[in-house]
Amino acid sequence: MQVLHHLNIVTHVLLGTAALFLGCVALANQHRPGKHRVYGRYFLYLLTGVVATALLGALLFRAMPFLLMLTFLSGYVGYAGYRCIRLRTRPLQGIDFGIALAVSLAAGIFVFGAGSKDASWSPAVVYPTLSALWLVTAYDMVKYLWLHQRLRHWWLYEHIYKMISAFSALLSAFSGTVLPHFKPYSQIFPSVICVLLIGYFIRQRYRMMSRREITSRAIAS
């Protein structure tokens, strides 16, 4: 079991490092749709591997609460960000609601159950991570049940928020592990940077779409 544990850790670290690199490349190619889609797809493949190895480690070996919470967050927002692109203005399906509900319940049970008894427990980072996860799952469930028509044109902004959030979770896990002596700042600072990136890219995309709409109206008139 010890050999399997070390093999799982090495695989998890390698996949996570590669995912961070490809995530940066995907962000850098946002104005090149073809390349952005290719690198984004490989980022999701690697993210799936990261989540799978993290869950395997949590089930078979000891898992740190913060890292497990980031697994819940990165896994869900990565999935939800992919679904934004697949569905676009179409409504979410029952499976999307079910996954959002299951992830939010599982994370809550973990946080208020066995996780809080762990010696490495850090409320300053675990509770904000849980709040971020509950925020996005609640948004998706409300959108499915009630507000799809009002929110359906926000799919691109949702995609930006969710995919950068997935990248942020990986980056926080990486920096928190590599720089343990600077916790909780080494875990919080990457999240702050990625929130700024989310605001920047959403604002940039909004301005671009507004210019296109103004141009279209001018041509039509």
Image (cartoon, rainbow, N blue to C red):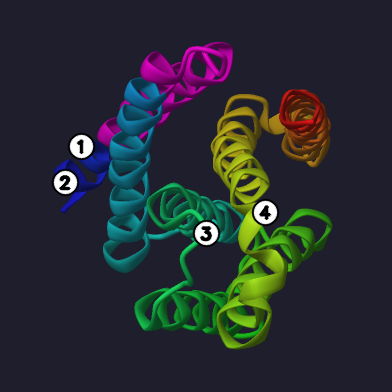
Q: What residue does disc 3 label?
A: 89
Residue 106: give x, y in percent of width and height: 50, 80
Gap between marks 1 and 4, in whole Å?
A: 41 Å
- Look at mark 2 in the image and give the residue it sits on: 4
Decide: marks 1, 2 in contact (CB < 8 A)? yes
> Separation of disc 1 and disc 3 at Cα?
42 Å
For marks 4 and 2, give the CA distance.
43 Å
Q: Residue at x 38, y 26 (%)?
A: 37
Name the disc covering residue 58, or none: none
In this view, the mark in front (1 or 3): 3
In the rendered image, residue 16 lying in the magenta stretch gets the answer: yes
In the picture, the quarter occupied by the C terminus is top right
123 with respect to 40 (left or right): right
Tag in front: 4 or 2: 4
Q: CA distance from mark 1 to mark 2?
A: 5 Å
Helix, strand or loop at mark 2: helix
Position of residue 44 measured from the top left corner of the image (x, y, whole percent): 36, 39
Mark 1 crowd level (few <14, some 14–19, many ≥20, 10 Å Cα): few
Q: In this picture, is 66 found above or below 29?
A: below
What residue is shown at x 56% (from left), y 74% (from top)? 107
The crowding category of the residue bearing disc 4, from other C-alpha atoms within 10 Å (few below 14, some 14 to 19, many at least 20), is: few
Q: Is residue 116 visible?
A: no
Q: Residue at x 65, y 86 (%)?
A: 146
Circles 4, 3 touching at the beta carbon (< 8 Å): no
Determine the secondary structure under disc 1. Answer: helix
Q: Which residue is mark 4?
A: 154
Where residue 192 sits in the image (x, y, percent)?
A: 83, 35
In three-dimensional space, the C-alpha distance between marks 3 and 2, rounded to whole angstroms, equals 44 Å
Amino acid found under the numbered disc labelled 1: Leu
Q: Are marks 4 and 2 in contact (CB under 8 Å)?
A: no
Lower sequence index among marks 1 and 3: 1
Q: Which residues are the magenta region? A: 10-36
